[in-house]
Amino acid sequence: MEPLLFFYAMKWLSFLWLTAFCLLYSISAATAAENWKTYEGSGFSILLPPGIKAESSRLIDFVLVDFTHGKRGFLNCYVGYAASFPGTEDPSAESSSEKINGIKVKVVTHHSRDKSIPLKEYFFERPIEKHPDLHIWYGNLSGQDLVNAEKAIHSIRWK
């Protein structure tokens, strides 16, 4: 009878350990997601990971926003009424369309010579004619910075 009691006790402890691990993992994942901050831009909002700073420059009829991580570039953004989209002129670039939070987005991807590091441009379609264009891009990102840039871009919403 004693070995059976030991078996059930170990089974119960395993269940408790697994439950505690899952609970702690979900709390840490939720905490990491909560550390992202919302940046409110001219007509749009974007979630940014910890450590990303935004510096905007308002020019005559448009705004440029540089998102940086320390001294390294992270994302660049143009908000105005005459966004240039040079990627469409590059015959080697890959062009596609997608929807991000219900917004039609044109995406152009350029690759470095060894195809390892992408330069990606996103052009968000205006929700209404009076709304400014939103053109956001990044280049030379890899690893977690690349993952975070994509997550940030896919969090964009019109205001």
Image (spheres, grey):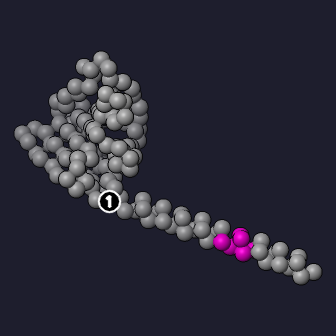
| 156 sits left or right of 59 in the view | right
The residue at 33%/34% (across/down) is 118
- Residue 110 seen: no
Query: Is label 1 in a helix, a strand or a loop?
Result: loop
Which image quadrant for residue 146? top left
| Image position of 22 with respect to 121: above or below | below
Q: Looking at this view, is 11 or 131 the one in front?
A: 11
Image: magenta residue range = 12-17
Q: Position of residue 42 (x, y in %)?
A: 21, 46
Q: Is residue 121 magenta?
A: no
Q: Position of residue 49 (x, y in %)?
A: 34, 56
The single residue placed furthest to the top in the displayed view is 91
Q: Position of residue 39 (x, y in %)?
A: 27, 54
| Residue indicated by mark 1 | 50
The single residue placed furthest to the right in the displayed view is 1
Q: Looking at this view, is 8 or 133 the one in front?
A: 8
Q: How many marks?
A: 1
The residue at 17%/36% (across/down) is 80
- Residue 6 seen: yes
Q: Residue type at mark 1: give it.
A: Pro
Q: Is the N terminus in the top left, top right, bottom left or bottom right quadrant?
A: bottom right
> How many residues crowd around disc 1 within 10 Å: few (fewer than 14), some, or many (20 or more)?
some
Q: Position of residue 83 (x, y in %)?
A: 19, 31
| 144 sits left or right of 61 in the view | right
| Image position of 144 with respect to 23: above or below | above
Q: Looking at this view, is 131 or 145 the one in front?
A: 145
| 57 sits left or right of 107 in the view | left
Name the chief secondary structure element in magenta: helix
The residue at 16%/30% (across/down) is 82
